[in-house]
Image (cartoon, rainbow, N blue to C red):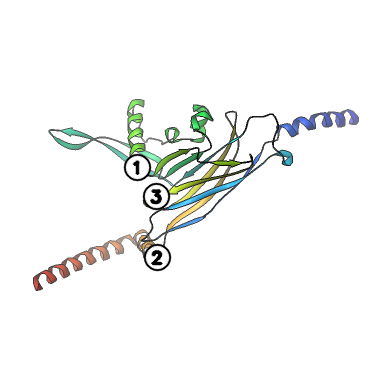
């Protein structure tokens, strides 16, 4: 019986090796991005390697593709729709989302629609159109779709949502790299850089790296003061505004 078990294990070993999946080893050029008063944006370099079972590329199989997704911290957001009434634009309907990424950037070796089907894109949130924004109300599907399109369009124009097909370069099927632009208006917080390895419409491997984007210098001091001592910060801001207004008036009278 032991001999039969050993023979069965030997026969199954090639099958198990064949089922082994590759592993991603990702990294990012900057784990911390500091925002000062002169910050005009940054460019992140995301790179890494694909480790295949046995240390060699599989023969006779379709080539693999790489998709990199950089996400900002999620936030609750209220989207308002404007309507023209008697020649005046006023707020009409509104819809709140519980969790919408404050920043979303996707870079891929090929257009994402050619890599995976719609269901897989929705599961892994691959693409701006596949984001799961979690509306807080049970509005009809057509209303949710209209508001989601409006939110995505606003953030696209602000440079906070964007996609870059063909932006990932793969060298010798092993090394990859991609560049993602961070705009000047980027929010602060903990960001994630997710890397996906795809072949034949299936996600073979995934890996995540964290990126911290934070204010520095005087901006950081002001942000911390506003967060930790909100009442005192408000009183100082009002007093400073009154003082500057009085000083401006006094100078104007003297001139």
- The crowd level at tag 3 (other Cα within 10 Å; few <14, some 14-19, many 20+) is some
User: Is residue 100 at all visible to an observer of this figure?
Assistant: no
Q: Quadrant of residue 85?
A: top left
Among numbered discs 3 and 1, the one appearing first in the sequence: 1
Between residue 41 and residue 169, name the one nearer to us.
Answer: 169
Label 1, secondary structure: give it: strand
Label 3, secondary structure: give it: loop
CB of mark 1 within 8 Å of CB of mark 2?
A: no
Residue carrying label 1: 77
User: Is residue 53 at all visible to an observer of this figure?
Assistant: yes
Which of pointers 1 and 2 indicates the residue nearer the eye? 2
Horizontal placement of 55 versus 4: left or right?
left
Q: Position of residue 235 (x, y in %)?
A: 26, 64
Horizontal placement of 242 versus 210: left or right?
left
Q: Is residue 228 above or below residue 97?
A: below
Residue carrying label 3: 183
Among numbered discs 3 and 2, the one appearing first in the sequence: 3
Q: Which mark is residue 217?
A: 2
């Amino acid at each position: 019986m032991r001999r039969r078990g050993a023979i069965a294990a030997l026969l199954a070993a090639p099958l198990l090796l064949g089922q082994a999946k590759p592993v991603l080893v990702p990294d990012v050029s900057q784990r911390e991005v500091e925002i000062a008063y002169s910050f005009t944006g940054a460019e992140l370099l995301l790179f890494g390697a694909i480790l295949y079972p046995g240390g060699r590329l599989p023969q006779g199989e379709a080539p693999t593709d790489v998709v990199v997704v950089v996400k900002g911290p999620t936030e609750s957001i209220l989207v308002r729709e404007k309507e023209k009434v008697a020649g005046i634009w006023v707020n009409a309907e509104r819809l709140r989302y519980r969790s919408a990424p404050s920043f979303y950037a996707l870079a891929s070796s090929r257009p994402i629609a050619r890599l995976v089907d719609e269901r897989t894109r929705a599961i892994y949130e691959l693409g701006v159109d596949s984001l799961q924004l979690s509306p807080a109300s049970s509005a009809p599907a057509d209303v949710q779709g209209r508001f989601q399109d409006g939110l995505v369009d606003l953030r696209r124009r602000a440079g906070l949502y964007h996609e870059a097909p063909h932006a990932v370069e793969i060298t010798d099927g092993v090394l990859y790299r991609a560049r993602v632009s961070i705009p000047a208006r980027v929010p602060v917080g903990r960001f994630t850089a997710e890397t996906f390895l795809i072949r034949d419409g299936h996600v073979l491997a995934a890996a995540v790296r964290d990126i911290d984007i934070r204010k520095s210098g005087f901006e950081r001091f002001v942000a911390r003061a506003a967060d930790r001592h909100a009442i005192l910060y408000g009183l100082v801001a009002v007093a400073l505004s009154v003082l500057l207004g009085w000083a401006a008036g006094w100078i104007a009278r003297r001139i």
